[in-house]
Image (cartoon, rainbow, N blue to C red):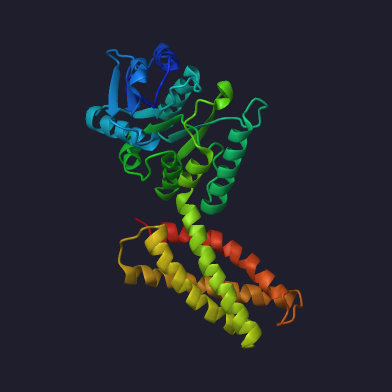
Amino acid sequence: MKNVSIIIPSLDPDEKLSGVIEAVRSVGFCDIILVDDGSKAENKKFFPSGDDITLLTHEKNYGKGQALKTALKYVIENRPETIGVITCDGDGQHLAKDVLAVGKKMAECGKFILCVRDFSLPDVPPKSRIGNRISSAALAICCGSYISDTQTGLRAIPASLLKPMSEIEGSRFEYETNVLLELRNMKAQYDEVKIETVYLNENKGTHFHPVKDTIRIFSQIIKYLISSLAAFATDIILFIICNKLLLLGVMLSTVIARIISSAVNFTLNKKVVFHSHGNSIKALMKYYALAIPVMLISAFGVKGLCLLLSVPDNSIIITLIKVIVDFILFILNYNLQKKWIFKK
């Protein structure tokens, strides 16, 4: 493990940090990079020193994500022989034997390694269990990637991924979720390693704020959802007007509603959700290259189900069928827009 660096970001540490460092030393690690992320003056004394320790300091608190990126950039510039790094927390929740296991796994396979906890155990705090299950489900539904533990701080990053990982957006807890999204976008191989689940004092020492940081973590998905809901509302309202009031029929009503709502959706996605600065014409062509097939699938899907279920053209059930069909298309659309139309 002499060519593997341990990265520990820390904000206002206590005596447990020294215990973590001694533990990783005891299993063979000899390059430890600490990041003081704007700790209070009274807590700075808990950052130990030594020949094997490098202390990087932020003058103010920028967040865990920025602390990790600061350390990654330092490794890129100062550790040319590295085979990778391991990120872990400084509060004792990651056992030394698990840190060593993830290091060996990365060295053997050269993949990005995620250490996952068992959230089914009875001593896991309900906040942690519920939060992780929700985030894992959201990631799976919206992005097609199921990861058992989306917020694990114990991760091994091979040398080949250090540079892209140091450039991923996010400065706080959302950075770790953005990493998972980008792993799939980069088609990077990753693996999971089960570790012992340790929670100290009901996890009260965490700097994670459930509401504020969850919004940060899923900010892009939330904005995409709002954008889609705005377009969806436009689509449904226009569909009802055309179908119920103007009696234009299911097919024509769907086409008119989709053309207008898609223009709303494209504008919001480009400017607000994905912050794309690419060629608008090219993106628009790709968008409608996707939107037209999706529109046809929606129209024929709704019409086909109406015929299959013998639903009359003026029935309210048509609207319900359309909601179900479009929800499925919503999930597919997010992935295709992120990875193809507005890809950075």
Q: Residue placed at 32% from the left, 19% from the top?
A: 31
Residue farthest along the right direction in this orientation: 310
For the residue pair 223 and 175, the one nearer the viewer reads as 223
Residue 62, horizontal then vertical, whole percent: 34, 36
Give left or right: position of 333 versus 279. right
Percent of width and height locating residue 47: 34, 17
Q: Nearer the viewer, residue 199 or 215?
A: 215
Does residue 168 appear in this view?
Answer: yes
Residue at the image point whose x is 37% and y is 19% from the top: 43
Residue 341 can be seen in this image: no
Give the image quarter of residue 324. Answer: bottom right
Q: Quadrant of the C terminus?
A: bottom left
Rendered view: 313 above or below 133: below
Q: Is residue 316 left or right of residue 14?
A: right
Left or right relative to 167: residue 314: right
Residue for point 37% across, 57% down: 343
Quarter of the image with the N terminus is: top left
Q: How many marks?
A: 0
In this rendering, the answer to whether 200 lies above or below 267 is above
Task: Give how far across and how far down residue 154 sits, in percent.
Answer: 46, 29
Q: Is residue 184 above or below residue 117?
A: below
Residue visible at 49% across and 77% down? 259
Using the rendered view, name the quadrant where residue 106 is placed.
Answer: top left
Residue 146 percent location from the top left of the image: 55, 44
**Which quadrant holds residue 58?**
top left
The front one of 331 and 319 is 319
